[in-house]
Amino acid sequence: MSDRAYALFEEQQKARGINLDEVKANLKALKIETPSWGYGDSGTRFKVFQKEGVPRNPFEKFEDAAQVHGLTGLAPSVAIHIPWDKVDDYSKLRSHAESLGLSIGAVNPNLFQDEDYMLGSVTNANAAIRRKAADHLLECVDIAKETGSRDLSLWFADGTNYPGQGDIRKRKGWMHEALSEMYKAMTPDMRMLIEYKCFEPAFYHTDLADWGMAFNMAQKLGPQAEVLVDTGHHLPGANIEHIVAYLLDEKRLGGFHFNSRKYADDDLIVGSVNPYELFLIFYQILNAAGDADPGVRQNVSNIAYMIDQSHNIEQKIPAMLRSVLNVQTQFAKALLINHAEVSAAAESNDVLGAEDAVRRAFEFDVTPLLHAIREEQGLPLDPMKAYLNSSYGKDILARGKGGASW
């Protein structure tokens, strides 16, 4: 790292009233959960292109995840998906994770790949199928207890393709019934994170189509239920940072599934299409971190930052490295916003001044700052280059092709 580059950056930020010691402390505290499925073979809606060296089982997924955390210091936990990551002994998987310096993060039930779920899982008109789906939710609560996981992350493909295919209000009741049963089975330290999606795979309606439906369901269930925002699950033009601000003010923002999309849920690498949106999401979060309401501040401190991406044409570990580093970069930029300056401009109705105070932080090159904190943490200045120069990517080719997949 160039000492001169950082000195100039430090001088520049001090002149703007930015406390770099606080910025660096916040950056070092940032934690991003990576998904086990992001290390395995996954595909588009048309085909899975298998890669050599992908993990053959959940244990190898954690070994790959340890590479990402070891090089970045950003990703100490790994989300699991059941049954994709089903094992006979979850305590053994937990011990394996801990031996690698990792923990098991959110447990994700799978309620969309079984043949029985073609017409829905917890909202299926068939009571036997609804019972099967509810039992799987309860199974995931038990798995979370074994793995020491705090969060249960729920996404449902349930919906209909045609008018009249299902009774929308009955399905709403069935959804609440299943989630209520799961909620009651949770321990007091667990959280239920309810995800939503505007469409797909159901094309007429989805049972949890937007943040308002997820928010309403969470409110009915209780304080341990919150909303999970997937950045790809919105219609084009949706103002995601507005949704984030609203949920924060209601103290119901549970977490994120970070990815990027051009149209809808492409699951591309986060920040690869619209990095400014990611920056503005962090702006709303950091603005709420200084709120006078302690409940809002507590909500900010409990947000789970998680990656949810389909690495179909990319090499898995480099794709995950790029993902967490993109998040870190935009978080770093958002930390450079002078909120007092923004507020002063807004209160005086200086429209362009307020916009400029936000945008100016986005335009800073934060490379000297990121290099400085990595140096202080004993991490490589360029984690991607360090991985590509290591032998790990070549060593895992011995696994062959046809590893674990969706």
Image (cartoon, helix red, strand yellow):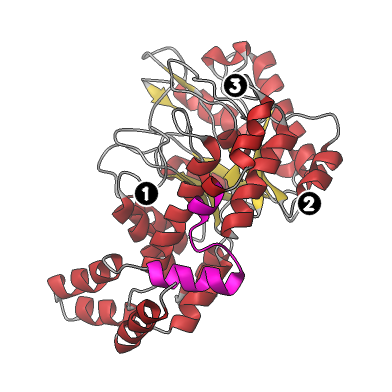
**Mark closer to the chain start, 2 or 3:** 2
**Mark closer to the chain start, 2 or 1:** 2
Q: How many marks?
A: 3
Using the rendered image of the protein, determine whether residue 40 is visible from the camera's viewpoint: yes
Mark 3 residue type:
Ser
Residue at 79% over, 38% down: 142
Q: Quadrant of the N terminus?
A: bottom left
Task: Mark 1: give few (<14), some (14-19) or many (20+) Cα within 10 Å.
Answer: many
Horizontally, residue 60 falls left or right of residue 354, namely right
Q: Which residue is mark 2?
A: 98
Q: Secondary structure at mark 3?
A: loop
Kindly report which numbered mark, 2 or 3, lies closer to the viewer in this rendering.
2
The numbered disc on residue 121 is: 3
Task: Mark 3: give few (<14), some (14-19) or many (20+) Cα within 10 Å.
Answer: many
The answer to whether marks 1 and 3 mark residues whose Cβ atoms lie closer than 8 Å is: no
Residue at 33% over, 77% down: 339
The numbered disc on residue 271 is: 1
Q: Position of residue 282 (x, y in %)?
A: 40, 62
Mark 1 residue type:
Gly
Q: CA distance from mark 2 to mark 1?
A: 30 Å
- Of 355 and 178, nearer the camera is 355
Residue 385 forms part of the magenta stretch: yes
Mark 2 residue type:
Glu
Q: CA distance from mark 2 to mark 3?
A: 34 Å
Q: Quadrant of the C terminus?
A: top right
Query: What is the span of residues highlighted in magenta in the rendered image?
Result: 367-387
Q: Secondary structure at mark 2?
A: helix
- Of 222 and 316, nearer the camera is 316
